[in-house]
């Protein structure tokens, strides 16, 4: 079964997506620039964070849906970094345990100053304190390689004896000059997931590279296809690449897309 992740710009949206069968959510803000760290991150401490399961999921329009939403999708296989949201009837989903938070302090490139890196480390530390499942990070050198010192610093903050965050490398990967060399470096750093469009503007255009990434990763990291995944192309992307996960954005038609993927036989 393919893991479904949805990028969400609010708490209510995230609960709705989990209620409709998403297995995981990425929390962020300002999607117009590719996403930034949510300004409302600290509010997760103060809001309800469970979505109950029922036999039949609601299909009400997004703006009409409550913040506590039903869900009925089956649980996908469990693997490192993949946290299934599904469970037997009458169980509940804890939003925090199914949420990854995007850590990106500004729009633009992925070459960060020391001050920007310190700011992102503070956000990662807050994520650990709140108790989310993981963080979505990335940093590049001016030459277009993974910035190993910057990444190691963020990973150090994300790692602890009692609460280590799942690590996702975001689509900065698609700006790397050597995707296959970068893949090996990212794996060596201990990342669990890699979000990518296959070094192309959209995942559909990146199918050839996505397929090679899945083959080269050989299960050492989960390759997640994202950017431009739609009802019309999702089946082709999954079947031709073998990706174990897809990343979707909250938009009109998202519930129909979620249901289509859940019911398909890929």
Image (tube, rainbow, N blue to C red):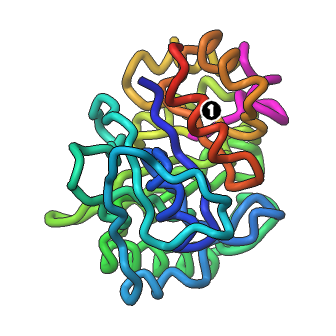
In this rendering, is residue 22 above or below 259?
A: below
Is 247 positioned to the left or the right of 78 in the image? right
Over which residues does the magenta segment extend? Answer: 195-208
Dot 1: element: strand
In this rendering, is residue 177 above or below 69?
A: above
Which residue shows up at 36% across the image and 73% down it?
Answer: 49
Location of the N terminus by quadrant is top left
Q: Quadrant of residue 248?
A: top right
Is residue 25 on the magenta stretch? no
Query: In the depicted view, which residue is nearer to us: 253 or 229?
Result: 253
- Residue 199 can be seen, yes or no: yes
Which residue sits furthest left? Answer: 162
- Residue 190 can be seen, yes or no: no
How far from the left and from the top, in percent, is residue 230? 75, 34
* Count of numbered labels shown in the rendering: 1
Is residue 199 on the magenta stretch? yes
Q: Which residue is mark 1?
A: 225
Which residue shows up at 23% across the image and 47% down it?
Answer: 89
Query: In the depicted view, which residue is nearer to us: 251 or 241?
Result: 251
How far from the left and from the top, in percent, is residue 97? 31, 60
Residue count near mark 1 (Cα–Cα under 10 Å), binned few <14, some 14–19, many ≥20 = many
Query: In the depicted view, which residue is nearer to us: 76 or 252?
Result: 252
Q: Quadrant of residue 224?
A: top right
How far from the left and from the top, in percent, is residue 200? 81, 30
How far from the left and from the top, in percent, is residue 134? 39, 58
**Secondary structure mostly seen in the magenta stretch:** loop
Which residue shows up at 25% across the image and 44% down it?
Answer: 87
Which residue shows up at 58% across the image and 51% down it?
Answer: 59
């Amino acid at each position: 079964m393919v893991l479904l992740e949805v990028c969400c710009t609010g708490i209510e949206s995230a609960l709705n997506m989990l209620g409709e069968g998403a297995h995981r959510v990425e929390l962020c803000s300002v999607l117009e620039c590719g996403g930034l760290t949510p300004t409302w991150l600290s509010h997760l401490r103060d809001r309800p964070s469970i979505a109950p399961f029922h036999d039949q999921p609601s299909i009400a329009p997004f703006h009409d849906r409550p913040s506590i939403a039903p869900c009925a999708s089956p649980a996908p296989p469990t693997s490192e970094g993949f946290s299934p949201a599904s469970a037997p009837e009458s169980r509940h989903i804890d939003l925090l345990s199914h949420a990854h938070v995007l850590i990106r302090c500004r729009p633009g490139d992925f070459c960060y100053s020391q001050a920007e890196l310190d700011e992102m480390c503070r956000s990662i530390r807050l994520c650990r304190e709140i108790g989310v499942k993981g963080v979505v990070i990335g940093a590049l050198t001016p030459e277009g390689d993974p910035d190993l010192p910057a990444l190691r610093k963020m990973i150090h903050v994300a790692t602890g004896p009692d609460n280590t965050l799942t690590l996702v490398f975001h689509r900065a990967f698609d700006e790397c000059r050597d995707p296959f060399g970068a893949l090996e470096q990212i794996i060596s750093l201990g990342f669990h997931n890699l979000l990518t469009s296959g070094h192309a503007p959209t995942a559909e255009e990146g199918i050839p590279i996505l397929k090679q990434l899945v083959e080269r990763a050989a299960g050492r990291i989960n390759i997640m296809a994202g950017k431009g995944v739609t009802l019309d192309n999702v089946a082709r992307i999954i079947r031709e690449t073998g990706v174990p996960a897809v990343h979707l954005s909250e938009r009109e038609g998202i519930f129909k897309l979620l249901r289509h993927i859940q019911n398909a036989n890929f």
